[in-house]
Image: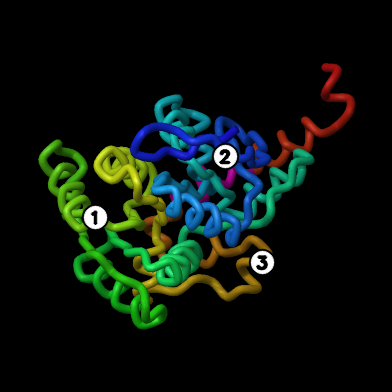
Amino acid sequence: MDRCPNGSGSTPVPAIPRVRLGAVEIMAISESEVADHVSEAWKRNSGGSILTANVDIVRAATRDPDLAALVADADLVVADGMPVVWAARLAGRPVRGRVTGASLVFTLSERAARDGRSIFLLGGDPGVPETAGRMLAERYPSLRVAGAHAPPYGFDTTTEGMREAVDRVAAAAPDLVFVGLGFPKQERAIAELRSRLPRAWHLGCGAGIPMAAQQFHRAPEWVQRIGGEWLYRLWLEPRRLAGRYLRRDLPFAIKLLSGAAWRRLPLSRHL
């Protein structure tokens, strides 16, 4: 059974199939099913968090037990990144496709608008979360934007800085918080927020906020389908992403895929 936290403890819900990749358990749940899960939880006054696991997150969690524990604390862990989807398929436990933080920002905003719920956007450059909130409200006219905040660089390095950001979100009392600070900063912020907003849902959405603000755009759909969005992001931000993508994530992705394929071979079970 999976847990679904609320103000008075955990409520059991039907188990979601999952596959273990490295130190991370990826859940076989589609994007629309994530929205359904959140919507049903709202009806029960139950909150939770969603983590979109890409190769970088799986790599970091596999190498650091503290980060693995942070990932395991999320209520929903979905496959963000085609290498994660491919590894699950090679392992014989296919997930239901890629579910990205950038896409969930729109899907969950649409569901929040339909359900009469409010959102808060935390993260991005100054002015960006406000722009994203305004554009989401224009796209979904019944959506309530409770607030937006771009915390200063390094805010999370001090107790006071983190408290100020969390206090600002908590004061707005949103039903859904988009936290776009990058892993693991956003998950650490979510851990703080959940204690203050136990009935809200929290999504670690990475670059989802600037994408919603059209600060930059996602790769064309055909590039996403073939698993090439990382190359598109690398082309857009080579200085920031080259070390992460090429030196760290690519070798780990190859190891992850080959390991998943090897474990599925009948011979490997007897070695």
Helix, strand or loop under label 1: loop
Marks 3, 2: nearer the viewer: 2
Whether residue 215 appears in this view of the structure is no
Q: Going 21% across and 50% down the picture, which residue do you hit? A: 170
Read off the magenta span. 243-253
Helix, strand or loop under label 3: helix
Marks 1, 3: nearer the viewer: 1
Q: Is residue 243 left or right of residue 179?
A: right
Q: Quadrant of the C terminus?
A: top right
Residue located beneath label 3 in the image: 225
Residue type pointed to by label 1: Ala
Residue 45 position, x and y percent, is 39, 48
Is residue 37 part of the magenta span, yes or no? no
Measure the C-alpha gap from mark 1 to mark 3. Answer: 37 Å
53 or 121, nearer to the observer: 121
Q: Quadrant of the N terminus?
A: top right
Q: Going 48% across and 39% down the picture, which residue do you hit? A: 4
Residue type pointed to by label 3: Arg
Which of the labelled discs sits on residue 173, or is there none? 1
Residue located beneath label 2 in the image: 13
131 or 233, nearer to the observer: 131
Measure the C-alpha gap from mark 1 to mark 2. Answer: 25 Å
Whether residue 21 appears in this view of the structure is yes
Residue 141 position, x and y percent, is 37, 81
Q: Quadrant of residue 189?
A: top left
Q: Is residue 264 left or right of residue 174?
A: right
Q: Residues within 10 Å of mark 1 (few under 14, many from 20)?
A: some
